[in-house]
Image (cartoon, rainbow, N blue to C red):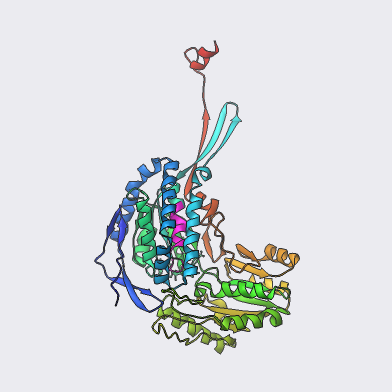
Amino acid sequence: MAQLEPCPFFIGGEWIESKLAGTPVYNPSVGEVIAECPIGTAADVNAAVEAAHAAFPAWMETPVVERVRILARFKMLLEDNFEDIVRCNTREHGKTLVESRGDVKRGMEVVEFALGVPSLMMGEVLENVARGIDCEAIRQPLGVCVGITPFNFPAMVPLWMYPIAIACGNTFVLKPSEKVPLTAIKIAKLLEKAGLPKGVLNIVHGGREVVDALLTHPKVKAISFVGSTPIARYIYEVGTKHGKRVQSNGGAKNYVILMPDADVENSTRGVIEAAFGCAGERCMAGSTAVVVGGAEKSVLPTLVEATKRIKVGPTDRDAQPDMGAVITKQHANRVQELISIGEQQGAKVLADGRGVKVSEAPNGFYVGATILDHVQNGMTVAQEEIFGPVLNVMHMEDLDAAIELANKSSYGNGASIFTRSGKAAREFKHRAKAGMIGINIGVPASMAWFPFNGWDESFFGDLHMQGREGVQFFTQQKVTTSRWFSYGEGDIWHTEKK
Ligand code: NAD
């Protein structure tokens, strides 16, 4: 067995190796344990929050241009260490190197966005709201903010949160997923190297006890969460009950509508990427293709052929497969079980990823790319977020029926359409009940300058992550109304006027 990588806490500028019992961090490509993530306690949370709280006054007073200069150095260090982060990300997650590059780049774009905080934090002034009275609104940071993140984007999701939070003058406590803590640690070391003062960013590890301590700590002002819907709802309910500002992203089931006039080659590529990219472990995965009318004869056969050609394998080496492993053995088993449940409930398996053999890595956590056809809305596979390389196919006779079907989903992250018709695309954009719409694009995940815009059960809160909403989330406004009197003969104004 390879030597285990360290998985320290980062509290008040100190990297602290824990003696606590941990949970295994795997290299899913080969099924080997590469680290143990300590399961922290409420005492660890308290130490991290106190460190962040102590660092806040000086950080808030640090001029905003100095704050973002540190982030500019951080961005350069991320570029210099890009491949190293990418390989770490792939090793603990299992996704391909190309996908890891996308993960890290998307996160770096948030840092680029955060460099604009001096402009984005600017307030508003209105002179003469009444005679001789002016009014101004400024933005100030909140204090200690917290981020709790999932396993599927080890680099990007933490970076959705803390670059904006700290650029705005807050301090931060991050709890990365216990399944993938190493990339978050590697990236935080670069921010430390860029000159971030001690205590401005802290990292704690753990599970429910740590999360509950963060949600209820009196010195925490705001919580950003990304993960599955049941936990997202819990975070929102407990966090807001304890007076915190909360933005909480949940799971999803995203529909991709294939119109009869869709370009076969481009839409096949788009759906393959949407359904099987990152082995389907994406909240923006296009997990259901709705085949409309003649698309059944044009796009679907090509899609099935392309799916059968997808090569699954280990991603922790130079020769890269098309698709990597899923996160754990249990998850691989659950995804295969769901495929079988789908089959038992009447779906037709057009491409079958169960029991896939990967000879060069027999202990890796693999599921092959799968297509389930004739899925009906009541089936388990239509209702549950499978979060694996499984594409459901449903058939509808026209666009109206397809939109109606997609809009029945309780989630609302993304929805896409492939068509050559501007009219169909406009109709879909207008009526689809989802916060991120793709037109001839399978995964319309917003870039850093726009909100990551889930609706319904995919998001709990008011202000989304990234973009201007991100800045609003991490700041509170202060409105000052001012009037100045003239004080008679001794007054400078009078003296000068004479
Ligand atoms: P998860 O909900 O299991 O875990 C997310 C975080 O919550 C982790 O840090 C975990 O330690 C913590 N957690 C888990 N169980 C908890 C509990 N009972 N109490 C308190 N905290 C708990 O999610 P995951 O499996 O790591 O990630 C996959 C999920 O995340 C999918 O549902 C996916 O759709 C979703 N996701 C959503 C978005 C989005 O922006 N909407 C982005 C990425 C992932």
Identify which residue is drawn at 51% across, 44% down: 121
Taking the image as four quarters, which one is ligand 1 found in? bottom left
Q: Which residues are magenta?
A: 150-163
Residue 162 located within the stretch drawn in magenta:
yes
Q: Residue furthest top?
A: 498
- Is 341 situated above or below 173? below
Q: Quadrant of residue 34?
A: bottom left
In the displayed structure, does residue 442 sit left or right of residue 163? right
Query: Which of the image's four quarters has the N terminus?
Result: bottom left
- Is 293 situated above or below 474? below
Q: Residue furthest front?
A: 318
Residue 471 located within the stretch drawn in magenta:
no
Is residue 286 visible in the rendered image? The answer is no
Question: Where does the image place residue 357, in percent across and percent down from the top left?
Answer: 45, 87
Question: Where does the image place residue 28, in percent across and percent down from the top left?
Answer: 40, 76
Question: Where does the image place residue 294, in percent across and percent down from the top left?
Answer: 73, 80
